[in-house]
Amino acid sequence: MGNFMSKIKNFWQGEADTEPKTDTAPAVEPKADTEPKTEPATDVEPKTDVEPATEPEPKAEPATDVEPKDDTEPKAESEPEPADVEPETEPEPKADEEPEAEPESEPKADDTDVATEAEPKLDTDPVTEPEPEPVVDLDKPERRLVTSIEENWGYVVGFSIQGRSHIAGGTPCEDYHAYKELAPGWKLLITSDGAGSARESARGSKANCDLAVRLVSQLVEQKKWVENNYMPTELEWFVEMRNLFAVIQHLIITSAAKQADAYKAGKEAELKALEEQIAQTTDDIKLSKLKVKRGDIEKDIAKPLEARDFNATIILMLLTPQGMLTAHIGDGRMGYKAQDGTWKALMTPHKGDEASATVFIPNNWNDQRCVPAFTMSGAYLPDVRVVKELPQAVVLMSDGCENITWSCYAQDKESGRYYDPNTPFAGFFEPLLEEMNAAEDKDARADRLIDIINVGTRAGKSEHDDRTMLLGVLK
C-alpha cells in the first residue's frame, strides 16, 4: 500500500494510514479491572486507607470497621485485633493491652479465609467485570460480489463491498454489479447502488443488474448488431434504453405487488420468533437491541411492500468494437481513458436539491407527459451517450467510491459557489492501473483493488457508504 500512496501523494489528499486495525486494540485491556487484588482486603485491613494522625481520641468510641489504635502501635505489634472480625465481643477500646499471643493465630486464619473468599469474586463477578462486546473491524467489509476475469484482450476486475455504516449496524451490502461478454469485442458492464432508505434495496440492485443483462443481450441479438457490426445513433440508443429501463421498472412494480402478501407473512413469522427470543433474554443491552428490531419489523408489517422498496440506481456500458454505448439512471460515476491518455467522464450524475437525493429505476421518471423526458442535473432520464472511440480503460462505480477517485467539488472563484467538475482524477487512476497491471493473477488483482479503495487512502478509510467498482482494461 505504501508504494501506491507514494505515487499519488503529490496529487491528492496525502499519504494514507496503513494500519487499519487500530480499532481492535482495546480488546486486550479489560484485565485492568482485575489487577489490584490488594483492594478487597480493605474491608478487613483498613489500616492502609486510614491516616492515624487525623483520628481524634480513638478511645472515645469502639471501632468496628477501622482500628486507629493499631496505627499508633509500632509496626512490630501491628497485627490486627479480634475487633476487626468480631467488634461486638470487644467493647473495650484498649485493645493494645491484650496479650499478643492470643489473637495471633486466629486473625491470621480469618484474614486468609476472607482473602480467599474475596479474590474469586472479583475474577468471576459479571457485574464488576462485564463480558466485552465483540469488536467489529470496520475495515473488513462483507464482499457481496467480486469479479475478476482475464483474457487475451485484457481484464475486468470489480467488487461490491459493505460500507462502514452497514458494518457497524449489521446491514448487508446493498450494491451489486454485473459483467458479461456478449460476443467477441462486445462487453456489457453494469453497476447498481441500492437506496439506503428502501427496505429491499439489496434485492433491487441485483434485480436491476440481472434484468439489464438479460434485456441488453436480447436487444443486441434481435437487432443483429454483432452480425452487422452496427453502432446505433444516440437517438436510437436513447429510445432503446428508455424502453429497456421502462421494462425493468414494470417488472419490479409487478413483482412487488405479487410478493406483498408473502412478504407480510414472512415478517409476521420473523416477529413471532423474535418475541420468543425477547422473552428468554435477561441481558438489558441485548434486550434493548431486540426491542428496536421488533419495532422495525412491526413497521414493515404495517406498511405493504411496494415498488419503491426496491429502489436502486443503474449505470450501464456496452463496449463494442467501434466504441462505447452508455446509459444510466441515478448517481454514481462512469468514465474512460482515451487513446491520448486523458481521463474523461461518461455521465452526469442525477442529483436532487437535497444531499444524496437522486432517482431510481422504480421512480416515475418516464412520465409520458414530458417530452422527450425528465431532466435532472441538466441530464435526461435516462442519460445516454454514444462515443465512437475505443478506450484504453473504462470504469463504473457507485457514489461510495467517487470521493476517492473523482473531482466532485470545486469553487467558482467569481461567484464563490461550489459546483461538480465531474472529472476523473488521473493522479489516482494512473497509479491504480500500474498496480492492477502488476498483479500476479486475477485473484490478487481483485484483492489489491479492494484494499486500495477500502483502506488505501484517508478518504477511503473515512467512507461509510457501500462501494462498487468495475474496472476494464484493454490491451
Image (spheres, rainbow, N blue to C red):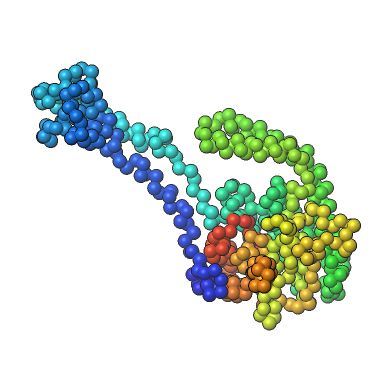
Residue 340: x %, y % from top left: 68, 82
Left or right relative to 47: residue 430: right
Tell me the residue at 35%/33% (across/down).
121
Instruction: Tell me if residue 355 comes above or below residue 383 in the rendering.
Output: above
Front position in the image: 326 or 399: 399
Instruction: Tell me if residue 473 comes above or below residue 120 in the rendering.
Output: below
Q: Is residue 474 visible?
A: no
Front position in the image: 124 or 404: 404
Q: Is residue 240 visible?
A: yes
Residue 269 lies in quadrant: top right
Residue 396 lies in quadrant: bottom right
Tell me the residue at 56%/71% (across/down).
12
Tell me the residue at 22%/24% (across/down).
63
Left or right relative to 14: residue 119: left
Residue 367: x %, y % from top left: 86, 56
Tell me the residue at 72%/37% (across/down).
301
Residue 70: x %, y % from top left: 16, 30
Residue 222 lies in quadrant: bottom right
